Amino acid sequence: MEYETTGRLENMLRQINSESGARQFVNEHTGGNGRKTFSSYMNEMIAQKNLELKEVIAASGISRNYVYQILNGRRSNPGRDKILAICIAAKLSFSETNRALKIAGAGILYAKDERDIWIAVALNREIGDVLKVNLMLEEKGVASLDI
């Protein structure tokens, strides 16, 4: 499945007027279950970026078992910091990270929150290692990611 912007999806949705069209849209853009899960999105992104799961786990700083539980869907409500850590480790962009946060039902990166601003800077710099991001956050005087 190719990543689509919300605006483009909304334009496509405006054109749907039949049940079969709606079913096709759901299958193509939500993983077929009516709602994409954080675990399915992250597994898709990790595969798309040709990353090894062990690399993502190591870079996240989160325990291996916990990450596996999140990514196989057994732990369905990880905290926002855990989501951010996995996104950073998976080298997601700013917009990909915000999409992951939305899918997980967590707050997106907020432009008026200093900590979120520095996290966005880390994403834009493609740091990809949560320990390095946490050092940067501490240097800036904001809370590090609770992993």
Image (cartoon, rainbow, N blue to C red):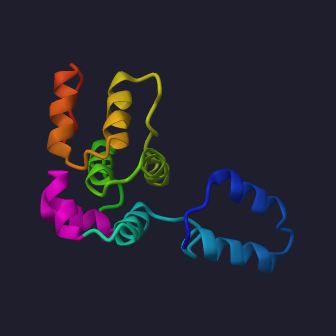
Q: Which residues are drawn in magenta?
A: 52-73
Q: Examine the rendered structure and indicate whether residue 111 appears above or below residue 39.
A: above
In percent of width and height, residue 146 lies at 20, 39
In percent of width and height, residue 82 lies at 27, 48
Visible in this render: residue 118?
A: yes
Visible in this render: residue 66?
A: no
Residue located 61% across and 69% down the image: 29
Q: Examine the rendered structure and indicate whether residue 4 appears above or below residue 33.
A: above
Instruction: Examine the structure image and report whether residue 129 is included in the region drawn in magenta.
Output: no
Q: Quadrant of residue 41?
A: bottom left
Residue located 62% across and 74% down the image: 28
Q: Examine the rendered structure and indicate whether residue 6 appears above or below residue 135.
A: below
Q: Quadrant of the C terminus?
A: top left
In percent of width and height, residue 118 lies at 32, 29
Instruction: Examine the structure image and report whether residue 62 is included in the region drawn in magenta.
Output: yes
Residue located 31% across and 46% down the image: 126
Q: Quadrant of residue 130?
A: top left
Q: Quadrant of residue 3?
A: bottom right
Q: Is residue 35 left or right of residue 91?
A: right
Q: So how many labels did they put on this image?
A: 0
Residue located 65% across and 71% down the image: 26
Instruction: List the single residue furthest toward the front.
Output: 125
Q: Please state which of residues 7 and 147 is positioned toward the viewer in this rendering.
A: 7
Q: In terms of secondary structure, what is the magenta stretch mainly?
A: helix
Q: Quadrant of the N terminus?
A: bottom right
